Image (spheres, grey):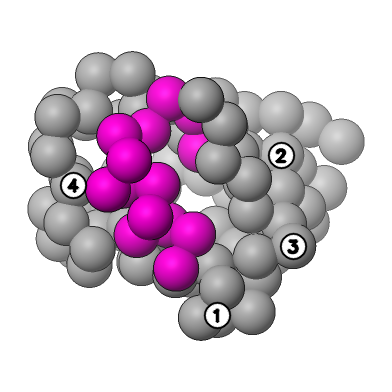
Amino acid sequence: MTTETIETPRRMGSREQARSFLATLPIDLSDSEIHIDCAQLEASAPSFIDEMVKILLVERSAAKVRLLRAPPRTREYAERSARNRGVDARFFAVD
């Protein structure tokens, strides 16, 4: 299994921005663990987070996604999105 770490921008706002943010990742992530480092994140919108979860865990089938050092609200958005999409067993939020 490969691991890829991506650092978030300071602000994450739209679904379109989420698609751009993840555009460089391979289409098939079924043998990958993706770490999203939120250390620099100041603000996030639910639409960005939901699109990110959808792309990584639903469309590209990442084996695991770890959200690192996310602000509490961002973490809540991501956990809710993963739960609503039925992929929460492969999603982990880590402080």
Q: Return the residue nearer the eye: 55 or 79.
A: 79
Q: CA distance from mark 2 to mark 4?
A: 22 Å
| Left or right, residue 63 beside residue 65 | right
| Left or right, residue 59 beside residue 33 | left
Point out which mark residue 85 bears. Answer: 1
Q: Return the residue nearer the eye: 10 or 25.
A: 10
Q: Is residue 69 magenta?
A: yes
List the residue tagged with mark 3.
89
Amino acid type, residue under disc 4 in the picture? Ser
Amino acid type, residue under disc 2 in the picture? Glu
Q: CA distance from mark 4 to mark 3?
A: 23 Å
Q: Which x, y percent locates residue 2?
A: 79, 31
Q: Is residue 28 visible?
A: no
Which quarter of the image is occupied by the N terminus?
top right
Callout 1 secondary element: loop
Query: Which-is-in-front pick, marks 2 and 4?
Result: 4
Callout 2 secondary element: strand
Circles 2 and 1 in contact, beta carbons < 8 Å: no
Amino acid type, residue under disc 1 in the picture? Arg
Q: Upstream in the sequence, badge 2 or badge 4? A: 2
Point out which mark residue 33 bears. Answer: 2
Q: CA distance from mark 3 to mark 2?
A: 13 Å
Q: Upstream in the sequence, badge 2 or badge 1? A: 2
Amino acid type, residue under disc 3 in the picture? Ala
List the residue tagged with mark 4.
44
Q: Which residues are magenta?
A: 67-80
**Residue at 25% in and 19% down:** 40
Q: Which x, y percent locates residue 18?
A: 28, 54
Callout 4 secondary element: strand
| Left or right, residue 43 beside residue 7 | left
Q: Which x, y percent locates residue 38?
A: 35, 28
Q: Residues within 10 Å of mark 2 (few under 14, many from 20)?
A: many
